[in-house]
Image: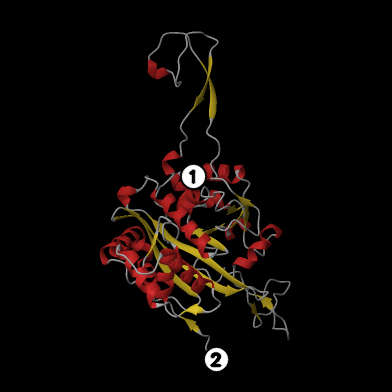
């Protein structure tokens, strides 16, 4: 028997379209939000992807980000698509197109596009997938996976990526998701490791499959190329992050199991023999399948899994700060001999030989604060 599907009212659909187009609606915002949340939190699923997107668009009212749907003006939707394709088209173009259209979605995994505005322009755009599944104990779970997030090239470094992320977290908090997964590439690892806030803390347990094989940070070609190996090590140590291969590899990571679909057992695989080769299948032998991080697109084999908790409640210890290490403060001895001003790296010069001044120098990574935010690809 097929599960009953929900459908939004004509009033809510009209409100979502009017909101996207900047026109008036007969339904007030509080009534629209109440209906949208009732649909999103119901046990049944909405009938179509566009209805889900419209309901999320209503929930996102006044959060700083728009959720695109069929009623979004075509120029704005096209601009958001251009931002995403410019950033990820070369490596994941077909997947981005499928996610925008919803072609690869099903009843439990549905994608939507978010876009932060700067007037009529797009300041940042991203693709999120909402996953709905049941945990091993049968309880329902709703998680978001941020597949891609990018800013227009001319706007990078202006804080658009960080602002868009904060807005996405606000929408997720209102929606009531259990957690947001950010599968970060190494190129964006420093950006995401510093996105924790009191309203959306980040798990101190980070998943990366390569961590079982030793110093994966030093082996990362991307971190080596950018010269970020030392900075990543320093940030991990300072923030006391624990890197685990999977929720099944360490006791500290075990509470994250509830954020992934239950791991299936594979009865057809026999247990390995002492010599390392698989022997004949024993009757009734069941071997657990490898951790694939279902239902998510990227597993810890391909990306670093950062979990954020927009509702504040988290199953693991979290960071509620930005993750920034303190700026270096150095003591510089003043040289009394007359020299050019450029010699002194201080704000205030004194003429006594025993003068000491605390100098707060700009951090070398300050320009990375809003570098191209490449989540996946």
| Residue position marked by numbered label 2 in the rendering | 1
Give the percent coordinates (x, y) of residue 309.
57, 58
Does residue 116 sit above or below 105 in this rendering? Answer: above
Depicted 128 relative to depicted 239: above or below: below
- Can residue 329 be seen here? yes
Observer-nearest residue: 77 or 155?
Answer: 77
What residue is pinned by disc 1? 228
The answer to whether residue 69 shows anywhere in this view is no
The answer to whether residue 372 is left or right of residue 5 is left
Residue 283: image location, x then y, percent: 73, 86
Q: Is residue 297 left or right of residue 97?
A: right
Residue 328, given in percent of the width and then of the height, sits at 53, 31
Judging depth in this view, the residue of 166 and 39 nearest the camera is 39
- Depth check, mark 2 against mark 1: the one in front is 2
Which residue ends up furthest to the bottom in the rendered image? 1
Crowd around label 1: few <14 · some 14–19 · many ≥20 (10 Å): many
Measured as percent of width and height from the top left, residue 199 is found at 55, 52
Residue drawn 52% across and 9% down? Answer: 353
User: On the picture, is 311 further left or further right than 347?
Assistant: right
Report the quarter where the C terminus lies.
Answer: bottom left
């Amino acid at each position: 028997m097929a599960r009953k599907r929900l459908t939004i009212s004509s009033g809510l659909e009209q409100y979502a379209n009017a909101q996207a187009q900047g026109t008036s609606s007969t339904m007030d915002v509080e009534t629209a939000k109440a209906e949208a949340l009732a649909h999103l939190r119901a046990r049944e699923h909405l009938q179509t992807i566009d209805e889900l997107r419209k309901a999320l668009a209503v929930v996102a009212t006044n959060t700083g980000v728009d959720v695109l749907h069929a009623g979004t003006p075509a120029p704005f939707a096209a601009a958001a698509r251009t931002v995403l394709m410019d950033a990820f088209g070369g490596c994941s173009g077909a997947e981005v197109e499928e996610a925008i259209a919803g072609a690869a979605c099903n009843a439990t995994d549905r994608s939507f596009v978010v876009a932060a505005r700067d007037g009529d322009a797009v300041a940042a755009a991203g693709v999120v997938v909402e996953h709905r599944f049941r945990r091993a104990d049968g309880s329902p779970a709703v998680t978001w996976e941020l597949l891609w997030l990018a800013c227009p090239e001319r706007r990078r470094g202006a804080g658009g990526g960080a602002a868009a992320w904060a807005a996405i977290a606000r929408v997720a908090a209102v929606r009531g998701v259990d957690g947001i997964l950010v599968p970060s590439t190494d190129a964006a690892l420093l950006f995401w490791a510093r996105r924790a806030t009191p309203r959306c803390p980040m798990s101190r347990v980070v998943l990366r499959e390569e961590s079982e094989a030793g110093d994966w940070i030093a082996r990362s070609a991307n971190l080596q190329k950018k010269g970020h190996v030392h900075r990543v090590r320093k940030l991990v140590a300072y923030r006391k992050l624990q890197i685990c291969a999977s929720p099944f590899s360490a006791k500290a990571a075990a509470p994250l199991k509830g954020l992934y679909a239950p791991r299936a057992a594979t009865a057809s695989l026999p247990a390995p023999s002492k010599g390392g080769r698989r022997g004949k299948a024993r009757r009734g032998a069941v071997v657990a399948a490898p951790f694939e991080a279902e239902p998510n697109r990227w597993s810890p084999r391909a990306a670093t899994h950062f979990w954020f908790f927009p509702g504040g409640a988290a199953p693991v210890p979290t960071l509620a700060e930005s993750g920034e290490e303190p700026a270096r403060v150095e003591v510089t001895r003043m040289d009394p001999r007359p020299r050019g001003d450029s010699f002194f790296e201080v704000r205030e010069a004194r003429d006594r030989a025993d003068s000491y001044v605390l100098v707060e120098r700009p951090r070398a990574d300050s320009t990375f604060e809003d570098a191209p935010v490449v989540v996946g690809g």
